Image: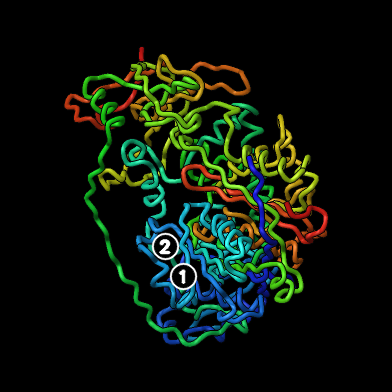
Amino acid sequence: MTTYFGVNVADVIESLPARFRKEAAADISGSFGYDLGDAGRWRLAIRDGGLTLTQAEVLDDCQAVLVTDPQTFVGIQLGKIDAAEAMGLQKLSVTGDRRAFGSIAGLFQKYVPSGQETLPEVELVVLKQTISVGQNFATGPVMGRFLKGLKERKILAIRCPVCGRRQSPPREICAVCRVRNTEWVEVGPKGEMRMLEYVYYASPDPLTGDTRETPYGAIGVLLDGCRDEEVFWHLLNPAQLDRVQMGSVINGRVRKGSRLRPVWAQKRTGSIDDIQYFELDT
Amino acid sequence: MARGKKNRHVGIVGIGETKFSSHREDVNQPEMIHEAVRQALDDAGLAIQDVDCVVHGNMELFEMVHQPDMWHVLGTGAYGKDSFRITTGGTTGGTLVCAADNLVASGMYDVVLAIGFEKLQEGHTTGGITNMADPLWARKLQSGALTDSAAVKLIEEFGEKRAKRAAMTYRIIMDKHACLNPNSHRAFGLDWDQMDDLITDSPPLIGNLRLIHMCSQSDGACAMIFAAEERARQIAARPVWIRDHITVHREETLNLCTNYYPNNPTHRFAAEQLFARNGIEDPLDYFDVFEMYDPSAWWGVDWLRDFFLLEGDAHLKLVEDREIAIGGRMPINPSGGVIAANPIGATAMVRVAEAAKQIRGNAGPHQVPKTVRHALASSFGGTMWTVLLMLEDELDGWGMP
């Protein structure tokens, strides 16, 4: 018989009576089925704290039937596959009374492949801890000048004296040319959208510790006066997520993106939050 | 770039990998690490007394334990030995191998044990990665390791239908490999008839990057033992030789939220430099297997082009023709790759360990069904880094620089 994860399906099924926990079955009565397709069908009849396991052609008389393939079945038994995830992937379904099926989940000791038996289970203690740290970062004269510019509704970039590329936020040096950046230029504040990260996943905002509201858009804006990869990384007005167009330059083929403008915060402190987000410039 | 010069050859003589899973609540960190160390020592037939130096690595932000190598000495065996700690994000495991190789090749130590581990369930993975971004600007914008950029680029260049099918083909092949690997954390048993449903129904994370495309958060450890040529031949019947490796990062890459190609990504730059200095003209022809650090199916497809220096849609064709499957022309990740298991500080080392096992011919059920003589392994992480390593089964035919 085929094995999955090194385990024979029949071993898992045939060990059910040995793994049956009588003491937990006192209040349960009924018939339940496992339909593993070509690998076979089994009926579990539970009555008066006892279990009768039989192979069956049809499971129509069962209160509930778990339908899956043998690989998923073994995977779940071994903890290799998450049952909810398998259900989401349509690898597993329960027909009939789902809740009744749920009630038998705790009736069996965990399946352990032969040779992998360990000591009797002991209580494992997990310690829960939370770290919360207040932080103060010095910005330095270059980043500081840029942040001060934001207070005055200006987006500053710094230009490499050798290759001419602009960086915003600015960096002290051009790491490619290995020279100090010296020339400041004002760019934007309007520009073209080049990249949208349309975020559904609710990750924490490390500045506040709060979970971000989703969906939101992180964007790369090619500010006026910049070229090629010289994008500015910020956020999009979440209400306009579905109305914007990404621009691109792929192998020399140019596609224009939506025009965007910054929405400045009323109270500006010299931080990324001085721009609330970018919005369509219409 | 200057060629990496070696004072002496270095062989991989011992490999240990724990089972990877979402939860290892049955063991604490040093205990979990010890499982891998024990396995590597047994694999090499060595005792901890035979090890001269221990290199230890993971990402402190994930478990928020600083200097974890102090606590972990209970499981690493580093007590009383010279010891170093490496923490370079996702590339940590690859950098650990590079460091161990350099420490042995230099003549400083004859036998070095390197250990990569992570217990991601003990912290917050996306929170940890987000704090990798520079705190003066990018922290607010960084969304962990999740990005739609590869999908955007592939769709822009090759059309939505073809790009999406290529990414899902890649994903299903990786799952088929994962099902063969007894160490896998995630192995679903995906099949071709599910392709269309998965493309449309898997929950979206960012844009076209869906849950099914993305790697997991895993617990696990990997340990490897490296020895100088003479010792390696005494220890192992079949040492696997580290031929060369390269590390590349690009300072501002993380800020480049753009839709611009070609943009000289670090993978391609690393591959060009490494293959040129080793005289390899056609990497697709030269290598027998590639263990790639592929955090998502989209990246996996996209990066094939960079690592094998391909042009046009050659990388898509490799996937579409299923030439990247275990029996194909260029098997990619017979282990199932990063999508199957991602204990981050160990992940990149697992790529090297799995590539080495393929050369030894004892990878297990996911052994490639052909002779493997030349293997490639990559690492990815940090603020867009590449570590690329070449492994060989023989010292003949390529020589000492």
Q: Position of residue B301 (x, y in %)?
A: 64, 41
Same-chain status of marks 2 and 1: yes
Which chain is mark 2 on?
B
Q: What kind of element bears circle 1?
A: loop
Q: Which mark is residue B166?
A: none
Q: Position of residue A122 (x, y in %)?
A: 41, 84
Q: Would you identify the image quadrant in which residue B371 lies?
A: bottom right
Q: Position of residue B337 (x, y in %)?
A: 62, 55
| Residue designated by label 2 | B121
Amino acid type, callout 1: Arg
Tell me the crowding category of disc 1: few under 14, some 14 to 19, or many 20 or more residues within 10 angstroms, Cα based: some
Which residue is depicted at the point 42% across and 14% down? A225
Q: Quadrant of the C terminus of chain A?
A: top left
Which residue is depicted at the point 46% across and 43% down? B383
Pick the residue in front: B153 or A85.
B153
Which residue is depicted at the point 58% across and 70% down? A33
Tell me the crowding category of disc 2: few under 14, some 14 to 19, or many 20 or more residues within 10 angstroms, Cα based: some
Amino acid type, callout 2: Gln
State if disc 1 and disc 2 touch (CB < 8 Å): yes
**Residue B288 against residue B51 in the figure, above or below:** above
Which residue is depicted at the point 37% across and 81% down? A123
Tell me if B239 is positioned left or right of A48 in this view: right
| Residue designated by label 1 | B24
Q: Position of residue B248 (x, y in %)?
A: 56, 43
Q: Quadrant of the N terminus of chain A?
A: bottom right
Q: CA distance from mark 2 to mark 1?
A: 8 Å
Task: Name the colour scheme.
Answer: rainbow
Specify which label sits upstream in the sequence, 2 or 1.
Answer: 1
